[in-house]
Image (cartoon, rainbow, N blue to C red):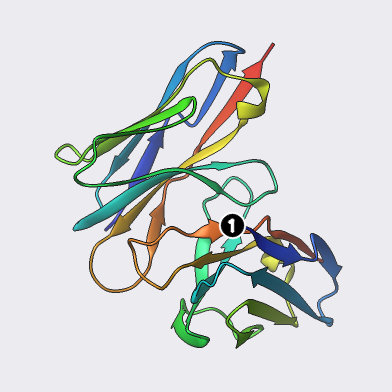
């Protein structure tokens, strides 16, 4: 069964600090992995998308890494801001037929003063 | 314009009501999706439309009826819903249907069934 597991479930950090969120997946065959940011009550917004041949991708203060061999990804947030408080969702897409994405349950990040 | 819009933002309806959720995109995307998201859970795929035709129905109860009147619009008609159907309903679109294409999500409609 295709699964995406994220850790930690929740995280509280002080403004200005860095943090790293983890994602492990069992989706096979693999097509791509996406990180989304979702504010409460809003739709997910894409941060990065990586295929198996990419092992790092940045979007401003967000840097995602991918190890397709160990089926692990991380999202590193640098110099956190209050507006980074949100749920961060790892989504893995399998290759082959259909268009189903496998969503992780997300990491709830809270940035405090 | 990379925006997917959804209306209404909030909807409260009784179990005997009929209502519709609307989704619109002007990115020229030919695949559109409905997702249901319960609190603190990931989105669950409900329907996929590809070139205005229903491509995937994830065994959704018939009280949810999707419609794609043209390539820019996607509706979700609701009838005789149950309180457990209360959730955030997300619309998304992608260039075409396929795992390698980015999905752009709308802000969602928060539905409460009383």
Give the quadrant of residue B36: bottom right
Residue B68: horizontal and vertical position, in percent?
61, 85
- The image shows residue A51 at horizontal and vertical percentages of 26, 48
Expressed as whole percent of the image width and height from the top left, the position of residue A44 reads: 57, 49
Q: Quadrant of the N terminus of chain B?
A: bottom right
Identity of the residue drawn at 26% across and 58% down: A1
For residue A69, above or below residue B80: above
Q: In the image as oriented, which residue stretches furthest toward the front?
A: B1
Query: Alpha-carbon neighbours of circle 1 within 10 Å: few (<14), some, or many (≥20)?
Result: few
Quadrant containing the C terminus of chain B in the rendered view: bottom right
Does residue A37 appear in this view?
yes
Which structural element holds mark 1?
Answer: loop
Query: Which chain does the residue under circle 1 lie in?
Result: B
Residue sitting at 62 percent across and 55 percent down?
A: B38
Q: Residue at x 57, y 81 (%)?
A: B71
In this view, which residue lies farthest toward the left? Answer: A69
What's the residue at 85%, 74% (across, down)?
A: B14
Q: Nearer the viewer, residue B46 or B26?
A: B26
Residue for badge 1: B2
Taking depth in this image into account, of B56 and B114 the one nearest to the observer is B56
State whether residue A82 is above or below residue A90: above
Q: Is residue A107 left or right of residue A99?
A: right
Left or right placement of residue B80 versus residue B73 in this view: right
């Amino acid at each position: 069964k295709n699964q995406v597991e994220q850790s930690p479930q929740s995280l509280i950090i002080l403004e200005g600090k860095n943090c790293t969120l983890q994602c492990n997946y069992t989706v096979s065959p693999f097509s791509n992995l996406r990180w989304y940011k979702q504010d409460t009550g809003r739709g997910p917004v894409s941060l990065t998308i990586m295929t198996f041949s990419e092992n790092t991708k940045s979007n401003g203060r967000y840097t995602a890494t991918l190890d397709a061999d160990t089926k692990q990804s991380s999202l590193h947030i640098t110099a956190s801001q209050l507006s980074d408080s949100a749920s961060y969702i790892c989504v893995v897409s399998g290759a082959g037929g259909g268009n189903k994405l496998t969503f992780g349950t997300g990491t709830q990040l809270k940035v405090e003063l | 314009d990379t925006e997917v819009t959804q209306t209404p933002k909030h909807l409260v309806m009784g179990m005997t009501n009929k209502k519709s959720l609307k989704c619109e995109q002007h990115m020229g995307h030919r695949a559109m999706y409905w997702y249901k998201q319960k609190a603190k859970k990931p989105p669950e795929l409900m329907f996929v439309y590809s070139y205005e035709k229903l491509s995937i129905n994830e065994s959704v109860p018939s009280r949810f009826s999707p419609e794609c009147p043209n390539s820019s619009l996607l509706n979700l008609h609701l009838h005789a819903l149950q309180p457990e159907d209360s959730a955030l309903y997300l619309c998304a679109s992608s260039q075409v249907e396929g795992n390698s294409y980015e999905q752009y999500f709308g802000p969602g409609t928060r539905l409460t069934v009383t």
